[in-house]
Amino acid sequence: MSDSVPSEAIQLIQEFEGCHRLDPSDGCLHAYPDPLTNAEPWTIGWGTTLYPDGRRVSPTDVITRAEADRCFTVILERDTWQPISRTIPYWSEMNDPMRSALCSFAYNLGSGFYGAGGFDTISRVLREKRWPEVPDALMLYVNPGTPVEAGLRRRRSAEGDLWTQGLGLLAQGA
């Protein structure tokens, strides 16, 4: 098990976040509106809404791919991985696939999800170590009836599959 963000988490998050709005004319990435609100929060690169220095992404922002990668790495480690590794119970008993699934979920919905309002089910199954129920609990967070539901269903399914893979490895003693 790793103390830093595993490659499974990085790959899963980047698959679903995508690195969007590359302008062929300047080779840079341009800010775009949130797909649910078509406005704030503005996003750039790999789903970045806040830069490492805390500034919000604004509609006119433009960055390079290297800057997008750097922002993603810093923010993922500092604002997602570190907080959830301290707050989610039994973290040290989980393996990389399980922790990676939760990291993707937290990157998408916020690192403070555990114990927060609106996250009762996922918090309960984690707190009570009802690990086989985690994939079903993840599927509750898909914004039903919205334009982003299908994408979130695919993401939650992938997170659940990764969690289940990790659970299988635990059962095998790996």
Image (cartoon, rainbow, N blue to C red):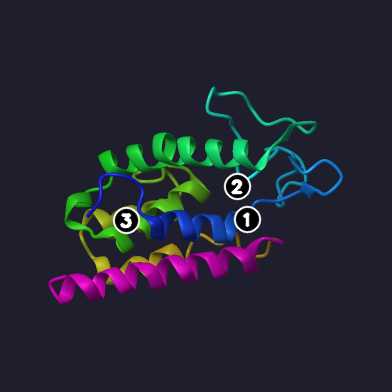
Q: Where residue 147 sits: x, y (%)?
A: 72, 62
Q: Which mark is on residue 18? A: 1
Which span of residues is magenta-colored? 147-174
Is the residue marked by circle 2 packed among few (<14), some (14-19), or many (20+) residues within 10 Å? many
**From the viewer's perspective, is the residue at label 1 or at label 3 nearer?**
1
Q: Mainly helix, strand or loop, the magenta region?
A: helix
Q: Is residue 39 above or below residue 60?
A: below
CB contact under 8 Å: marks 3 and 2: no
Query: Which of the pair 110/128 is nearer the observer?
Result: 110
Horizontal side of residue 94 vs 53, given as left or right: left
Q: Tag 3's secondary structure?
A: helix
Does residue 5 show up magenta in the picture? Answer: no
Residue 136 seen in the figure: no
Quarter of the image with the N terminus in it? bottom left
Going from the N terminus, do you reach mark 3 or mark 2 first?
2
Going from the N terminus, do you reach mark 1 or mark 2 first?
1
Q: Tag 2's secondary structure?
A: loop
Q: Where residue 132 sits: x, y (%)?
A: 27, 72
Which residue is pictured at 22% across the width and 48% down the height? 89
- Name the residue beneath numbered marker 2: 46
Whole-angstrom CA distance, mark 1 to mark 3, is 21 Å
Q: Which mark is on residue 99? A: 3
Q: Is residue 116 above or below residue 128?
A: above
Which residue is pictured at 48% across the width and 47% down the height? 107
